[in-house]
């Protein structure tokens, strides 16, 4: 038994409370080492004749990555507190694993040996808005989606789509244009819009804010924005804005005051200034976002800055009834600020969704006191590596994604913001070498996986583009230039997701372990009564996939084709064309 690989801590993804009163417990062991795990548990104050009374339940292996197996159990402590340990068997020996180490027999003379979950306080439970689980997001870069009012176009605006995008050109996209396209979004099946920044700024991307309390004039008036949000809500579409609180823009008045007045500026402590006077070259002598002199970092520990930004958060929720905040460069802002931000905006609208931009392990922000979710870039990278770059196998994908899923509690994964492209990445069709079949597979996975999926504008009609600024082309509105095949494919997936709760977040996801040389990726989602099995052939050659379950006596339906599948015997074999897929329900 490889005891050094066994790990648990009574916190975060290893022990957490769900809203239904369940306490979920996870254990990590070396891969293919432990044969059986039993959870030993009991109330710390439940004693009988100087012996601690315990119960036990078997733990289920919930997945395996490259190095570890993960085990899972769920209990409902009657008094909302628990002491617990693990009985592990590797086929040759059995040991009891506790907080104090390993024992040949479970100690019962004192509960202090065991892991402790002191009390299931409601305030500590991670609880994201319920509506997010069934939302399909659509990210819009406002300057490039649709021009609805040419009277407010910025100076030197270019005809729509007449040139390739650059960091400095403008095409006149605005809120009126987006509102005119609500029927298109409804027809696609979208139920949430995520905007990149719309506040007054110098650039076309608006991540260099000048005034956080004003809509950029090129996008329209606040009245127009209110009408747009109202129209979205009438069409059951949520609206999420982008908050850039890590840094301001160069032309933010408070920063301009520091540039002008130096140490005498009333705003000198709003930023992280190293020395005066301020200089931008060869490298700024003040903290910035990524050494960009035009994006000076804000000092969110300064009380004045903190109150200014908190009011920004409150203002757009209070006055415009937005449904979510996406927080740019969220990991570079202090945790204390985000805790206060959550309290302030949730006090106005408890069902507000708070999404952080964090590209790495995000557990410190997902403990119920800061964010509801983060942008799931590890998910993105695994999908790109398997389908687009083809640098990993289906087996490696399963191992990688198992690791990602087990990084977080189940209730966090249910609202993870899953994406395959954004304003910061190359277009997904470009990543796939313009192979439409592989793009179809990617969207099939995205829209049948756990979490809340997001489509980057134009990806649904097969727009192309390299990294920023290439990924920020004007939306193509000529139907003859849109890929209707891909559009219909995504439209159908969204419809099926809405009709079948298991395709969203209604059941438990489990990967079917692929063989060493298996080209097919498969996973199931089950609620105990019904199961959906998604199978994707990741190879250009046709493949026969045998579902590794006894389906004898069960009615199996091809959900994509909407037809029953006739087969004899316990096994079902599905024929898949190159880069083909199947969605089965039984």
Image (spheres, rainbow, N blue to C red):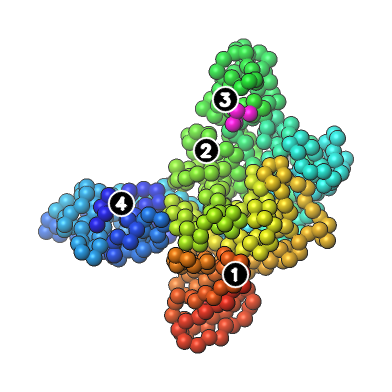
Q: Is residue 46 above or below residue 515?
A: above
Q: Please say whether residue 199 is visible from this viewpoint.
A: no
Which residue is at a point 18% across and 54% down the rendered structure image? 103
Q: Is residue 159 above or below residue 87?
A: above
Answer left or right for 320 relative to 376. Answer: right
- Magenta residues (range): 287-292
Q: Secondary structure at mark 3?
A: loop
Q: CA distance from mark 4 to mark 3?
A: 41 Å
Closer to the camera in the image, 492 or 285: 285
The residue where tag 3 is placed is 287
Mark 1 or mark 3, which is nearer the start of the sequence? 3
Occupied quadrant, residue 64: bottom left
The residue where tag 2 is placed is 331
Asked if labels 3 and 2 touch by Cβ distance under 8 angstroms, the answer is: no
Q: Secondary structure at mark 4?
A: helix
Mark 1 or mark 2, which is nearer the start of the sequence? 2
Which quadrant is home to the N terminus? Answer: bottom left
Q: CA distance from mark 2 to mark 3?
A: 15 Å
Q: CA distance from mark 3 to mark 1?
A: 52 Å
């Amino acid at each position: 038994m490889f005891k050094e690989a066994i790990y648990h801590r009574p916190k975060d993804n290893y022990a957490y409370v769900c809203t239904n009163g369940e306490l979920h417990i996870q254990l990590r062991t070396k891969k293919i080492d432990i044969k059986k795990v039993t959870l030993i548990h009991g109330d710390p104050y439940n004693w009988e004749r100087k012996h601690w009374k315990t119960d036990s339940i078997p733990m289920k292996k919930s997945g395996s990555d490259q190095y570890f197996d993960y085990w899972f159990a769920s209990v409902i402590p009657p008094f909302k507190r628990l002491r617990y340990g693990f009985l592990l068997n590797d086929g040759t020996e059995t040991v009891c694993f506790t907080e104090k180490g390993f024992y040949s027999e479970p100690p019962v003379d004192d509960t202090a040996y065991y892991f402790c979950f002191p009390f299931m306080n409601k305030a500590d439970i991670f609880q994201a808005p319920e509506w997010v689980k069934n939302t399909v997001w659509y990210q819009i870069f406002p300057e490039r989606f649709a021009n609805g009012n040419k009277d407010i176009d910025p100076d030197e605006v270019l005809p729509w789509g007449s040139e390739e995008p650059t960091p400095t050109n403008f095409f006149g996209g605005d809120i009126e244009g987006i509102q005119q396209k609500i029927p298109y979004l409804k027809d696609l099946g979208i139920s949430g819009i995520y905007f990149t920044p719309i506040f007054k700024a110098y650039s076309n991307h608006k991540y260099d804010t000048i005034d956080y309390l004003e809509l950029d004039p090129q996008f329209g008036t606040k009245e127009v924005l209110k009408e747009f949000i109202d129209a979205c809500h009438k069409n059951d579409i949520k609206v999420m804005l982008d908050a850039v609180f890590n840094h301001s823009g160069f032309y933010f008045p408070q920063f301009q005051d520091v540039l002008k007045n130096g140490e005498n500026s009333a705003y000198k402590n709003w930023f992280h200034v190293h020395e005066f006077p301020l200089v931008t070259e060869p490298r700024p002598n003040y903290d910035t976002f990524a050494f960009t002199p035009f994006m000076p970092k804000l000092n969110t520990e300064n009380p004045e800055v903190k109150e200014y930004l908190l009011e920004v958060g409150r203002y757009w929720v209070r006055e415009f009834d937005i449904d979510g905040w996406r927080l740019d460069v969220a990991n570079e802002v202090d945790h204390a600020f985000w805790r206060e931000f959550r309290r302030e905006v949730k006090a106005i609208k408890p069902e507000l969704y708070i999404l952080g931009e964090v590209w790495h392990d995000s557990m410190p922000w997902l403990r119920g006191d800061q964010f509801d979710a983060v942008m799931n870039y590890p998910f993105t990278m695994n999908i790109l590596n398997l389908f687009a770059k083809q640098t990993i196998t289906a087996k490696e994908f399963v191992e990688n994604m198992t690791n990602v899923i087990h990084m977080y509690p189940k209730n966090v994964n249910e609202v993870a913001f899953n994406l395959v492209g954004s304003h910061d990445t190359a277009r997904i069709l470009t990543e796939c070498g313009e192979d439409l079949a592989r793009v179809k597979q990617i969207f099939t996975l995205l829209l049948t996986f756990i979490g809340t999926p997001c489509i980057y504008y134009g990806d649904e009609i097969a727009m192309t583009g390299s990294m920023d600024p290439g990924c920020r082309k004007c939306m193509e509105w000529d139907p003859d230039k849109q890929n209707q095949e891909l559009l219909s494919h995504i439209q159908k997936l969204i419809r099926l997701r809405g009709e079948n709760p298991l395709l969203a977040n209604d059941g438990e996801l489990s990967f079917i372990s692929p063989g060493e040389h298996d080209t097919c990726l498969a996973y199931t989602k089950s609620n105990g009564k019904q199961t959906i099995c998604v199978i994707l052939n990741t190879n250009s050659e046709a493949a026969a996939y045998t579902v590794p379950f006894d389906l004898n006596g069960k009615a199996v339906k091809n959900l994509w084709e909407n037809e029953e599948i006739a087969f004899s015997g316990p096994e079902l074999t599905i024929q898949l064309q190159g880069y083909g897929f199947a969605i089965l329900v039984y």
